[in-house]
Image (tube, rainbow, N blue to C red):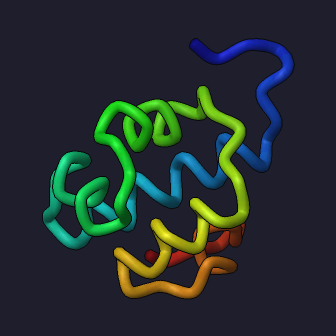
Amino acid sequence: MITKTTTKTRLLFARNLRRAREARGISQEMLAELAGLHRTYVGSVERGERNISIDNIERLAKALGLEPENLLRRDADC
């Protein structure tokens, strides 16, 4: 659930993560497995519901073959 306290950066990250995953044709479940995370966690991050740690940003970026900063760029072409 998105609330007033959800930051623009969190929503930007969520959008970029989803786009990058979909561009690679992989499911949330597969991304979670590749990153060593739970599928429901990945889903909640993609919906902007979770305040993700830097460690998990790195894990997801690595699983997608990206640098972490790519998932935080406003003009990201993931």
Badge count: 0
- What residue is at 65 percent from the left and 66 percent from the top? 55
Residue at the front extreme of this rendering: 36
Against 40, is 32 above or below? below
Name the spot of residue 61 as percent of width and height, x first. Answer: 49, 74
Which corner quadrant of the image does residue 19 belong to? Answer: bottom left
Name the spot of residue 13 as percent of width and height, x first. Answer: 62, 54
**Which quarter of the image is occupied by the C terminus?**
bottom left
**Which quarter of the image is occupied by the N terminus?**
top right
Q: Nearer the viewer, residue 57 or 3?
A: 57
Task: Say whether residue 8 is left or right of residue 48.
Answer: right
Name the spot of residue 8 as percent of width and height, x first. Answer: 79, 41
Against 52, is 59 above or below? below
Task: Say whether residue 22 is left or right of residue 37.
Answer: left
- What residue is at 77 percent from the left and 27 percent from the top? 6
Against 44, is 10 above or below? below
Q: Nearer the viewer, residue 50 or 16?
A: 50
Q: Nearer the viewer, residue 9 or 43?
A: 43
Against 46, is 53 above or below? below
- What residue is at 29 percent from the left and 40 percent from the top? 39
Which corner quadrant of the image does residue 3 belong to? Answer: top right
Task: Say whether residue 10 is left or right of residue 43.
Answer: right
- What residue is at 57 percent from the left and 87 percent from the top? 67
Task: Say whether residue 55 is left or right of residue 35.
Answer: right
